[in-house]
Image: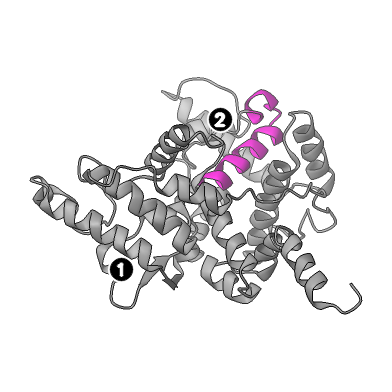
Amino acid sequence: MIENSLIDEFLNYLKFERHFSPHTAKCYSADLAQFCAFLGGRTGQAGAGQRMAPGSASFGTARGGVGGPVGAGGMETAVAIEQDVQQKLREVTTEQIKSFLSFLGTLSYSKSTIARKLATLRSFYKFCLRRGYVETHPLATIRTPKQDKRLPKYLEIEQINQLLGAPDTNTLLGARDRAMLEVLFSTGVRVSELVDLNFADVDFPNQTIRVRGKGKKQRTAPIGPTAIAAIQKYVELRRADARAARFDQEALFVNKHGQRLSTRSVRRKLDKYLQECGLDPSISPHTLRHSFATHMLNNGADLRSVQELLGHQSLSTTQVYTHLTTPRLKQAYDDAHPRS
């Protein structure tokens, strides 16, 4: 049996100590599998960015070993491959990292994707250095490639009203969809935080919701009366449904089968209403989060407050929205400055 690898240990650290989301850990795993395949000279597989279970023979093969079934003698081969991969990971040099970056450049990845993969390696080798698995950090002298600045897309208030008015609130699913869209725009929560909401998280009298964000960090977010009313309408129709007793009694938003809604389902529902309204089909649930932040700042909210409402750990993450509010600031300057 293949013993736990450095990558297994690192992914467990992300999951159980850093409380990273399964999606984030999956991305880290794919990035590291690609890097291992590159180290093993398996550039064909390296370009695929496999998402395989760490510690398995197939994962070891993807990390740079040779293919073949794992049968009699196959497991020994898999163990040898895994041990070779572990050795390569411990002995990685700065020049190999640079070669990997050059290789990524040939795959037509965007600058942001390359930067993310580089961040994965930084985090992994920082972990290895702290645990004593390597003596030096191979990325210490490597700079992250400068990325193109892309401003977040957001919706004008007329578009928001058009979108929120699209669901038919006389039906259970329509009322649910209206409530979801209202919550997304009213609070700025991530779609993963939306589907994670429970009945107990909604404080109707005080008009707040309890949000479980990244890293299992909780925050309390205010929610507007229109969104509260939409939730109440949905809850009334849900409780009146003949199948209500079989629904997930904890989850706030459920699918037609009564199970907790998935993020993918939210995106599909949004796509449906975008098409009905004739709005840009590239709009995503995250666009509503961008819209929330932009309109808050445009209407006078301070950056620190918006940072807390969004659950951003760093203020620099929130500052991207200030670029979208420049016209408002320019107008305020023209209106107020005596020599403008």
**Rendered-image quadrant of the C terminus:** bottom right
In the drawing, what numbered circle is on residue 61? Answer: 2
x 34%, y 54%: residue: 179
Query: Is residue 34 located in the magenta-colored stretch of the structure?
Result: yes
**Rendered-image quadrant of the N terminus:** top left
Q: How far across and how far down the image is residue 203, in percent?
A: 30, 73
x 55%, y 22%: residue: 67
Query: Is residue 307 located in the magenta-colored stretch of the structure?
Result: no
Q: Mark 1 is on which residue type? A: Val
Q: Nearer the viewer, residue 249 or 33?
A: 249
Which residues lie in the magenta part? 25-47
Q: Which residue is mark 1?
A: 202
Q: In the image, 240: left or right of 230?
A: left
Q: Nearer the viewer, residue 112 or 126?
A: 112
Calculate the distance from the C-alpha at mark 2 to the C-alpha at mark 1: 48 Å
Q: How far across and how far down the image is residue 106, in percent?
A: 78, 29
